[in-house]
Image (cartoon, grey):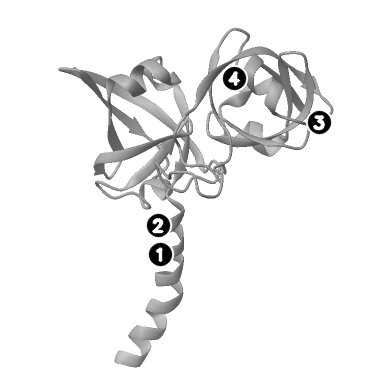
Amino acid sequence: MFTGIIEILGTVMELREHNSGRRLVLSHAGLARELRPGDSLAVNGVCLTVVAVEGEHLHFDLAPETLSRTNLGSLSPGQPVNLERPVRLGAPLGGHWVQGHVDGLATVLSRQHQQDFDLVWFTCAPELLAYMVPKGSVALDGVSLTLVEVQPDRFSVALIPYTLAHTTLGLRRVGETVNLEVDILSKYVRRAVEILLPTFLTRSQ
């Protein structure tokens, strides 16, 4: 479990074919000293398992499901990636509950610079928009954000200067994709309504 508060940026060193998926190699000296094989790490919002540590390099295996649902398969050497370690018991919960289980991709529609922040519009699959509400939470490339507006075919978020400077979202351009995870609470609420509403309507007739 994560909170969507990005700790640091790592650097992609290599992405190569490996078995039925791909092997992703990242570089970050500090994390490489702290993590061990078997540990979890959120990379651009995707919960991955460290499979090897070699010097300053962290190795991860990307399964076909991960490659089809996220943007990790399009990474290239030299690119920065958002990194976050799992939340520890007793640690402050600065963002919202993020599982690292990406629901799909969102595409940047526009960026509007407004004073000291950017208002960014995204589009995504309609079934994912159904889980969003204004002032609700969403994770984009692992960054916990507050939704500004939600329309039938798009949504917007405001990126403050810190987010622009310390995450990959400051680099995303129109047409590029980000990993999208909707709020887990909205999933449970919608599922509960889908199950209970027919029963309620039947009883009220």
Under tag 3, what secondary structure?
loop
Residue 99 is marked as: none
Check disc 1 and report the residue beneath it: 189
Q: Residues within 10 Å of mark 4 (few under 14, many from 20)?
A: few
Give whichever of 154, 3 is nearer the camera: 3
Which residue is located at x 36 percent, y 25 percent? 108
Check disc 4 and report the residue beneath it: 74
Mark closest to the chain's N terminus, 2 or 3? 3
Which residue is located at x 35 percent, y 45 percent? 137
Check disc 2 and report the residue beneath it: 186
Percent across and percent down for residue 172 are 40, 18
Check disc 3 and report the residue beneath it: 20
The Cα atoms of the two marked residues, 3 and 1, are separated by: 36 Å
Q: Mark 2 and mark 1 in contact (Cβ < 8 Å)?
A: yes
Whether residue 173 is visible: no
The kind of residue tagged 3 is Ser
Under tag 2, what secondary structure?
helix
**Tag nearer the camera, 2 or 3:** 2
